[in-house]
Image: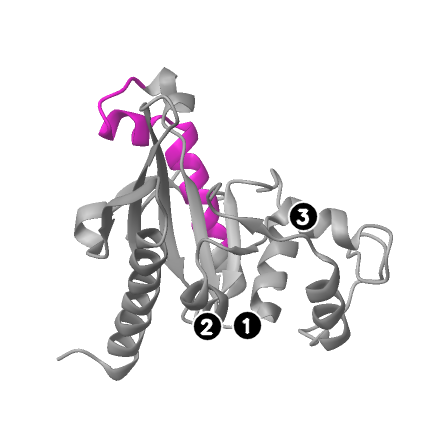
Amino acid sequence: VVSPITLSHELEVMDVKTAFHSAIRGTKTFSVVEFTTWPLLNQFTAKRPGRDGEEVLVKPDGFIRIHETEADDGLSEHTFFFELDRSTETLDTLVSRALCYLDYYKSGHFAVKNGGKPTAFREYPFRVLMVFKTAERRNNIAELLVKNIPPVLTHAWLSTQEEATKSPLGAIWVTPADYRTTVKGTAFDSESREPQSGYQRQTARDVWIEKKIPKRSLLST
């Protein structure tokens, strides 16, 4: 029996998938070659940070492969993994997940899965699209990814569920690097403010960031 929480999550994943297909159909040069949402097809093992090299199984919510027809009739490929936050996992768990994706890339395991050599991992790039229910969750993860050692600055792109279902190809995506640049030297810069015990909401931060932070488009449409 599928739990109501799992069913709701799967439906929300399908909403994003539908939005991607609809947006891509509106372009002339892009096509969705693959958008799988079956975790067993996309699962992989990666080293979890801070666990003495322990390998864990990661089951992505989705895997996306998009082809772009170029002006000279050449073909380029854009590859993404997709994660939809349930808001039930801890922030540390989500950070760990982002780091597992980075390990999967840098270890060359993704390259091997696609027929390449581990040393050629740079020839098989991908980004992780992480979608959150609120801008607050998005900003909290961005801050933690910036503070992590090593930081995750551009490998993960972050957005909200509302934006991803309305305009997944639009300027809705934020990188941790963008977040760091936006808050640097402000009252919202975690490096300059006093540490706080326990979680405290930062409504003023989230409103301010939404007005100031640059957002990126997923593809050059």
Residue 79 pos. (x, y %): 35, 39
Q: Do residues under tags 1 and 2 come within 8 Å of each other at their CB atoms?
A: yes
Q: Which of 169 and 203 is in front in this view?
A: 169
Give how far apart the Cα atoms at labels 2 and 3 are: 23 Å
| In this view, the mark in front (2 or 3) | 3
Secondary structure under the numbered disc 2 in the rendered image:
loop
Q: Name the residue under label 1.
A: 134
Q: Which of marks 1 and 3 is nearer the N terminus?
A: 1
- Assess whether residue 102 is covered by the magenta stretch: yes
Residue 206 pos. (x, y %): 70, 70
Number of residue marks: 3
Q: Residue 29 appears in which quarter of the rendering?
A: top left
Q: Is the N terminus in the top left, top right, bottom left or bottom right quadrant? A: bottom left
Q: What range of the chain is rendered magenta?
A: 95-117
| Residue at image coords 58%, 58% | 141
Give the left or right position of residue 170, taking residue 121 as reference: right
Q: Which of marks 1 and 2 is nearer the N terminus?
A: 2
Q: Name the residue under label 3.
A: 178
Badge 3 amino acid: Asp
| Residue at image coords 37%, 17% | 120
Residue 59 pos. (x, y %): 28, 53
**Residue 219, labelled with which disc?**
none
Secondary structure under the numbered disc 3 in the rendered image:
helix
- Assess whether residue 220 is covered by the magenta stretch: no
| Residue at image coords 44%, 67% | 166
Q: Mark 2 points at which residue?
A: 87
